[in-house]
Amino acid sequence: MKREITSRASFSRRAVLIGAAQFGLFGAIATKLYNLQVVQHGKYATLAQANSISERLIAPERGIITDRFGVILAGNQQHWRALFMKAQCPDPEAVLDNFSKLVALSDDERARIDTDIADRPQYIPVLLKDFLQWPDMAAIEVNTPNLPGVIIEVGTSRIYPFGAALSHTVGYVGRPNRAEAKSDTVLALPGMRIGRAGAEAGQDQPLRGAPGFVQTETNVHGEVVREVASDGGTGGQTVTLSIDTGMQAMALQRLGALPGVAVVMDAQNGEILAMASNPGFDPSLFDKGVPTDVWKGWMADPSHPLQDRTISGLYAPGSTFKPTVALAALKSGSLTPDSYLTCTGSFTLGDHLFWCDNHVAHGTINLTTALQVSCDVFFYQVALGVGENNISAMAKQLGIGTDLQMDMPHASPGLVPTLDWARAHNIHWAPGNTVVQGIGQGYTQVTPVALATMMARVASGLAVGPHITRRVGGALQVGANAADWPALDVDDRHLALVRQGLFEVVNTPQGTAFAARLMLPNVQMAGKTGTAQVHNDSAAEKMKNFDAEKMAFLDRPNGLFVGFAPYDNPRYATAVIVEHGNWGAKSAAPIARDLLTYAVLNDPAGRDAPLGGQPTASISVPAIAATDVPANADNGTAVASTTTQTQ
Amino acid sequence: MNTIDSYAISLHRPFRDRSFGLVRKFLRINWLFVLCVCALAGVGYAAMYSAAGGASTPYANSQLYRFLASLLLMLALALVDIRLIAKLSWPSYLLGILLLVAVAKFGHTGLGAKRWMTIGGVEIQPSELMKLFLAMGLAAWFHRASYERAGNVFFLIPPILLILLPVGLILKEPNLGTAVITAAIGGTIMAGAGVRWWKFALVFAVIAIAAPVLYHHLHDYQRARIVTFMNPGSDPLGAGYNIIQSKIALGSGGFSGQGFLHGTQNQLNFLPEKQTDFVFTIIAEEFGFIGSIAVLGLLFGIVSIAFYTALRCNHQYGRLVALGIGTNFFLYCFVNLSMVMGLIPVGGVPLPLISYGGSALTAVMLGFGVLMSVHVHRDVEFAVEEF
């Protein structure tokens, strides 16, 4: 009984104490209520006066996108637009009729406006018309008394100073569709855009920013009497890409009129310095809506300008796949650094004959020589020895045939077949399939970014992942330092051996890319050429001594080159593909040489300011310069420049 | 004087007969408490009616039906012997944990957190039920503890685990607000059970020292994740839009209010979904400071009666459960009102009995049923050995 009383007494004391504390907190709430409701009543009453205060959200300005040196790749251009606030208008139908007498509205536009007015909350204005011309503006201003609820304000639209040159990398924005506007009220604001491709889509959230608001007091007729409060909101963050615009411009210039791809990557951290996909398109058209004829033109164009070949173009890697096969064989032990295999110019498997390049017999050679002269027969045997599953596993480790987690949408993983894959697709896998896999033909398909990643990983020994976002809002992103990446699970001696073979490809007279060696003192490039057949002519396949120059353009093989430099201290990895360019050594290798020469001389990797302090982007960039973007220009000028832009 | 007399008499005449009549039990229910609960539900009905622009649909009537159903549940529960309820403490606790695990697996997402699930067409929020079940579990544990025993550190390890398990599960939803409330209820019951004050001071000190150090060592993106975690989806328009509108609604109410159905902030829909978490703004705007204080008084009336019930109860189980239920209700009110006035940024905590929605209401009324059972059975012989 004594215990019960002690326990109860303790409880009672404590319960009273806890109760008192809770009473005290209730008291604090009551005090705060008194302060809000009685003391500050006047201030809040003004804010809430019946129907006299209306609030309107304002779209934040979209963040800009720059290259690594601060050159603007996506900016904002100002223009005038007319908005409508239903909260300030007693009769929307009449106002819209008056408005359409001043500014022509199509039936479609009128229908959209009516739906928007019915759908949107009070504080979200509805867009009537953007890109207003000066005469329209004047007409609206003069007729203000007949247009209660109509507001004219400065809006921004997206401008891409480099146009097609960076169209795939930077991407483009579009207007949110109705479902998107419903799911997120902020997207219903006039002027809000959603990134649809490239970095605009990959970094859409930080680029968007947070909306501001304006509270205005209006009289019974809906005329604005004064602004009560406003908050500009938070503009989107600046996104700094790892791209070096100068290098990108050079890549495009060197590709010229040929459809193709050039990727340059920082082998130590996976940052992409250039990713040119030729041809491109004008990304600014998407902001206003692409005209139908332009769209039809793009769709009909056999060179598919909208496709970003760098991340979604699928190519047979050809001989550029040989380093992967070699590493797979070295890892499995089926090939050793001292192994010698014999090439008689052809290889027989069952009743099938596989030719070496041009029927050349290379004799008895080891791995480095086989890479140097690009001997097919050597790799037929190596592939057969190591097997398709080991090749596929090594390819995935090097970044081929696997999802590389790119920070931009629509990237394809490519394909390196395995037995399981063949079974799943009802394909009978014969040893001959493994043989051609050894020289990167058959079912194997890679993206140029994956090839560049493979080269970067072989060059640095780090499992770097390709990415283009270097900074968001100034903050360096994870992955910008070599220490952010794990080491590759491949023996360093094997990597060194393959790198030596790739060195001999470029820097010995017998090497297939000797003509494309760097003309720089003390700096060498290493690399591998590739010439990948794109058509299925079995005769040409068997002969293997076709004269590519005489073939129809679309039947010609693709020219490929992967490489890295400097050989002693690998920093830059590249992959170049010239579609139907015939020999990789002649078409792709010289472009890679020029890009790596540029890279070595300007050394942009890891830098936020160009070497020597001068912007490198002045090299042969398209006509519109970054200075054309009116950051805070006088409104009149902005409208004028918009007019010229739309012509 | 009268109270003390009846208390003394009841000590001498404990209910030895377990099956004392249902009618007598019914009459023993604290009808002042029931009156307070009904009054608050009435306030809620008025607010729902006003939120719909002066219509009993879609909110007011459906909420009224839900309230009447849960009121019947509460009255029925009040007649169940507290010793039976006590025996169900552990199964209930287990059920609560299972529901929390189930919601993590099969639940659906609302306001950026996985906290809802549907069972037989009824939406439930297991974290709301868990607060009651935790109070019951802890009360069962400490029922047999003397004041000396509550001072034993090893005796405290199981109840601490009892608290941390559901708190961890709720944190994972993520629902920081409810997790903190759950932990606070657990802590309050332990304080009531006689756990020494210095141990609480020690725990607070460790948290206060560790938190900034931990925060300092996080990456930027991890910090951003924590900020999002603390405030999931509660402010979709940015720029503190809800808080600004909420304060305007409170402030424009003034001393006597703008009048029923005449609150401009409310009627012009400046606050999205105002009938749920921000329901207090409707009352404050239309009935002013007087109305707000009256509601505050009713809310505190309920808390007070819960404490009164705890103090009058003759067994430790009832005392602790009543303390937990009263504190739960208090924390609901305090967190919700602080949020509405912009003092704390946590979202997703409704104002009990008034906000629109069924799951929190049902959980609160279940707790009140247990509370009334404690009140009805305050004098039963409930020996330590009965566990």
Image (spheres, grey):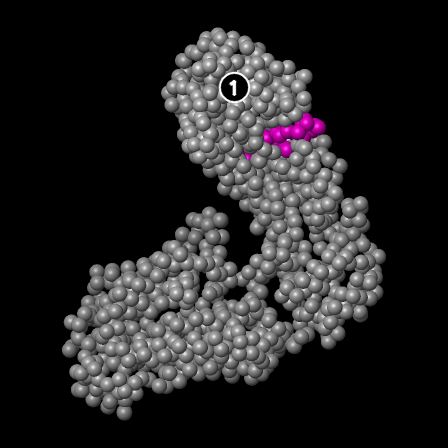
Amino acid marked by disc 1: Leu
Q: Is residue B137 above or below residue A15?
A: above
What residue sits right under mark 1 in the picture? A502
Closer-to-camera residue (A58/A308): A308
Q: Chain of mark 1?
A: A
Question: Is residue A624 at least partly visible in the picture?
Answer: yes
Task: Let me know if residue A128 appears in the view.
Answer: no
If the image is split into quadrants, where does the N terminus of chain B sit?
bottom left
Depth order, front residue of B324/B214: B324
- Please identify the quadrant where the C terminus of chain B is shown: bottom left
Q: Identify the residue shown where x is 60% and y is 26%.
A: A576
Q: Is residue A159 left or right of residue B127?
A: right
- Return the x and y of residue A134 as percentages of the image width and height: 82, 55
Q: Is residue B102 above or below residue A172?
A: below
Camera-side residue of A262 and A477: A262
Task: Say above or below: B78 vs A233.
Answer: below
| In the foreground, B22 or B178 | B22
Local secondary structure at mark 1: helix
A267 inside magenta stretch: yes
Residue A157 drawn at (x, y percent) = 70, 50
Q: Check if residue B28 falls in the magenta segment.
A: no
Find residue A496 and report its image quarter. top left
Residue plotted at (46% across, 78% down): B64
Q: Quadrant of residue A412?
A: top right
Tell me: B36 left or right of A471: left
Q: Dot 1: few (<14), some (14–19), or many (≥20) neighbours within 10 Å?
A: many
For image coordinates 31% across by 67% down, the residue present is B133
Please provide the residue range marked out in magenta.
Answer: A250-277
